Image (cartoon, rainbow, N blue to C red):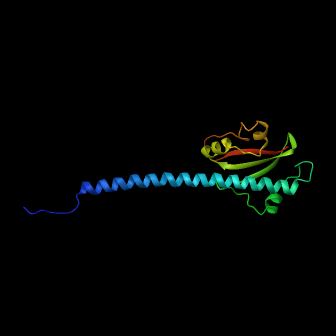
């Protein structure tokens, strides 16, 4: 009998299975990295928005003159967030010395992540003696969730 060399079909299937597992793991890692980057960008954007509002309207007694297009134009920033939604600014109707930054267009998971994040300079975080996140949101299924973070006095 003649000895044949080469790979069998079972060996090839084994190699493909291992490659598939490695590829699936890579997709999970890439997805996690992308989500981490998006949350980091939202944090940076909210910090820039808050700084811009305080610089532009800090001399006034209240934030009742807050205007989205004026603020975003003055700080040279788009109101689009990395999740495909928008950032919105509003005055707190219960206290004109406070303003609210809203992050719109979030999935349930992204909403929950931003609601539980500690927004260190926010009214809710400071008033809770650093025990609560400072953000609020009703996170439900779908991509229309909103997280609100209140700043001011």
Q: Is residue 22 left or right of residue 10?
A: right
Give the left or right position of residue 87, taking residue 37 as reference: right
What quarter of the picture does the N terminus occupy? Answer: bottom left
Q: Residue at x 65, y 44 (%)?
A: 111
Q: Which quadrant of the view contains residue 77?
A: bottom right
Task: Count all numbered tags in the image, as a single digit.
Answer: 0
Of 33 and 67, the residue lying toward us:
33
**Residue visible at 42% across and 55% down?**
23
**Toward which corner of the image does residue 5 lie, by quadrant?**
bottom left
| Image spot of residue 105 (x, y percent) | 67, 50
Place of residue 142 in the rendered image (x, y in percent of width and height, measured from the top left): 61, 45
- Quadrant containing the C terminus is top right
Q: Residue furthest front?
A: 129
Across and down, in percent, residue 133 comes to 71, 40
Q: Residue at x 32, y 56 (%)?
A: 15
Residue 96, above or below 26: above
Rendered location of residue 43, percent (x, y): 69, 52
Please tell me which residue lies in front, 122 or 62: 122
User: What residue sits 79% from the left and 42% below the top?
Assistant: 123
Identity of the residue furthest to the left in this view: 1
């Amino acid at each position: 009998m003649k000895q044949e060399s080469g790979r069998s079909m079972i060996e090839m299937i084994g190699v493909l299975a291992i490659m598939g597992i490695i590829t699936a793991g890579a997709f999970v890692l890439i997805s996690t990295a992308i989500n981490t980057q998006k949350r980091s960008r939202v944090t940076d954007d909210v910090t820039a928005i808050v700084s811009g509002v305080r610089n532009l309207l800090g001399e006034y007694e209240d934030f009742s003159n807050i205007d989205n297009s004026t603020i975003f134009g003055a700080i040279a920033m788009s109101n689009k967030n990395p999740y495909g939604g928008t950032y919105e600014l509003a005055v707190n109707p219960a206290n004109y010395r406070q303003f609210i930054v809203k992050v719109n267009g979030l999935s349930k998971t992204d909403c929950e992540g931003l609601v539980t994040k500690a927004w260190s300079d926010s009214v809710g975080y400071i008033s809770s003696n650093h025990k609560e996140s400072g953000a609020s949101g009703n996170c439900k299924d779908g991509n229309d969730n909103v997280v609100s973070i209140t700043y001011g006095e």
